[in-house]
Image: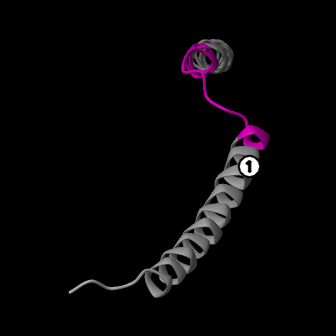
């Protein structure tokens, strides 16, 4: 009976070691994948959130200025059309 228990103990110890090795391999693979992913992101030259927000605000201000200038131009064109004599 002792031999059977010893075999089971050895088998349990082996399975514990295999599980530990599998966890170690998983951590290693995760580390490699993470570093490759971070390298890919760096190489893509992506902008930061702050840079994106700054450019978005600049675009909104430019759009507002464009609308104001369009309205001003339309008013000037209307005034010019009223002041010029019509020839028929």
- Image location of residue 6, percent across then percent down: 67, 13
Can you name the residue that lies furthest to the left here? 88
Query: Residue 41: x and y, percent?
Result: 59, 23
Segment colored magenta: 36-51
Q: Is residue 44 magenta?
A: yes
Q: Nearer the viewer, residue 37 or 21?
A: 37
Q: Nearer the viewer, residue 63 or 34?
A: 63
Q: Residue at x 63, y 17 (%)?
A: 42
* Residue 35 image-quadrant placement: top right
Residue 25 among magenta residues? no
The percent coordinates of residue 25 (x first, y second) are 60, 13
Quadrant where the C terminus sits is: bottom left
45 or 85, nearer to the observer: 85
Colouring rule applied to residues: one colour
Identify the residue at horizontal 65%, vertical 21% (top origin): 23
Whether residue 53 appears in this view of the structure is yes
């Amino acid at each position: 009976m002792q031999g059977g228990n010893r075999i089971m103990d050895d088998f349990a110890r082996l399975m514990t070691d295999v599980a530990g090795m599998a966890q170690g391999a998983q951590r290693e693979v995760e580390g490699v994948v993470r570093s490759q992913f971070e390298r890919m992101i760096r190489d893509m030259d992506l902008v930061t959130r702050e840079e994106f927000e700054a450019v978005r605000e600049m675009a909104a201000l430019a759009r507002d200025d464009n609308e104001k200038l369009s309205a001003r131009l339309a008013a000037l064109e209307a005034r010019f059309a009223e002041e010029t004599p019509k020839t028929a």
